[in-house]
Amino acid sequence: MMKDRQWARLAGVSGILFVVLVYAGVFLVDTGILGGLGEPPPDAGGEEFLAYFTSSHAALLLKSYLGLLAFCFFLVFVGGLCNAVWGATNDYRCSGWWPLAAE
């Protein structure tokens, strides 16, 4: 079984991976490194939006997958943060979301 220090380290690494994956997804898609057209302005016509989504399909799909993976790491980070904040004071050990609702 992992000790509290190892869980805290895992939570910290998960927080760093969350930030890296979110920025990687934004950077890869929005800069056009993966190809495709640049994002059209908000007042663009429907044809421009259709061309954007058609040409950038793979890049947008990759951004979605990176965002989903980043969210998983974010949940681990929040669990570790919850354990660090409430574990020392109330000894909740953050069992589910109940401690968040009880406070």
Image (cartoon, rainbow, N blue to C red):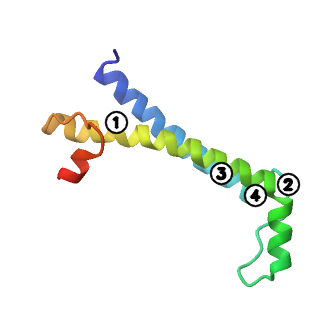
Label 1: few (<14), some (14–19) or many (≥20) C-alpha neighbours in 10 Å: many
Residue that label 3 marks = 64
Single out the residue that lies furthest toward the top.
1
Gap in angstroms between the C-alphas marked 1 and 3: 25 Å
Gap in angstroms between the C-alphas marked 2 and 3: 16 Å
Gap in angstroms between the C-alphas marked 4 and 3: 16 Å
Q: Nearer the viewer, mark 4 or mark 1?
A: 1
Residue that label 1 marks = 80
Say whether residue 20 is visible: no
**Kind of residue sitting beneath label 2:** Gly
Can you tell which mark lies on residue 31? 4
Say whether residue 61 is visible: yes
Tell me if label 2 and label 3 are in contact, CB under 8 Å. no
Gap in angstroms between the C-alphas marked 1 and 2: 37 Å
**Kind of residue sitting beneath label 1:** Gly
Q: Is residue 80 above or below residue 34?
A: above
Which residue is pictured at 55% across the width and 44% down the height? 70
Left or right: 33 with respect to 23?
right
Residue that label 2 marks = 35
Gap in angstroms between the C-alphas marked 4 and 1: 33 Å
Tag 1 secondary structure? helix
Can you give x and y, in whole percent of width and height, for residue 19 in the image?
53, 46
**Badge 4 or badge 3: first in the primary sequence:** 4
**Kind of residue sitting beneath label 3:** Ser
**Tag count:** 4
